[in-house]
Image: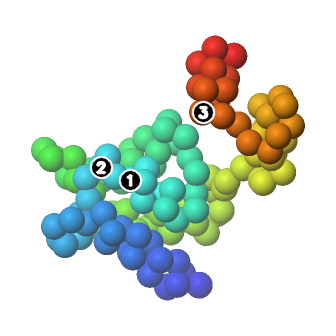
Amino acid sequence: LVAEIEKKITEAFEVFDRESNKTVDVREIGCIVRSLGCFPNEAEVQELVAKIEVEEPGGFIHLEKFLPVMTEVLLEKRFRPIPEDVILHAFEALDENKCGYITKEDLVKHLTEE
């Protein structure tokens, strides 16, 4: 199981490893974590980054430092997505006309004014 998880993490990491040198920009960590089906908020991403040794001065993270931290996250099933029924309920609350969709204008209004 651990080997399978580590393979999945490595594959996700490599997508963002533009130089193919087993490092990624620290700013990519949130994207990598989310691509693995975990949905932390930005504060939680920063906590993860704090656990990983960041190479100075460029702010790069090595796969060997990322792998054990992310393996632990996946094994513990941390940062799971919000259940579909909760998202559907939130959508239905925004769909005031019960038409099955929300216009861009309505979404912007809800997100910025309400």
Q: Is residue 77 left or right of residue 67?
A: right
Farthest-out residue, left: 57
The image position of residue 43, as x and y in percent, is 50, 36
Front residue of 96/31: it is 96
Residue at figure coordinates x 72%, y 49% from the top left: 82
Q: Is residue 96 visible?
A: yes
CB within 8 Å, label 1 to label 2: yes
Amino acid at circle 1: Ile
Element under disc 2:
helix
Residue under label 3, please give it: 104
Q: Quadrant of the C terminus?
A: top right
Picture quadrant where residue 7 is located? bottom left
Residue at figure coordinates x 49%, y 85% from the top left: 3
The image position of residue 88, as x and y in percent, is 80, 46
Give the Cα separation between the discs numbered 1 and 2.
Answer: 6 Å
Front residue of 87/3: it is 87
Compared to residue 43, the image places residue 37 above or below, namely: below
Amino acid at circle 3: Lys
Q: Is residue 15 left or right of residue 82?
A: left
Q: How dense is the environment of label 1, judged by Cα within 10 Å: few (below 14), some, or many (20 and up)?
A: many
Looking at the image, tell me whether mark 1 or mark 3 is earlier in sequence order. Answer: 1
Amino acid at circle 2: Val
Residue under label 1, please give it: 29
Compared to residue 34, the image places residue 6 above or below, namely: below
Residue under label 2, please give it: 26
Element under disc 3:
helix
Q: How dense is the environment of label 2, judged by Cα within 10 Å: few (below 14), some, or many (20 and up)?
A: some
Q: Quadrant of the N terminus?
A: bottom right
Picture quadrant where residue 92 is located? top right
Give the Cα separation between the discs numbered 1 and 3.
Answer: 29 Å
Element under disc 1:
helix
Q: Is residue 51 visible?
A: no
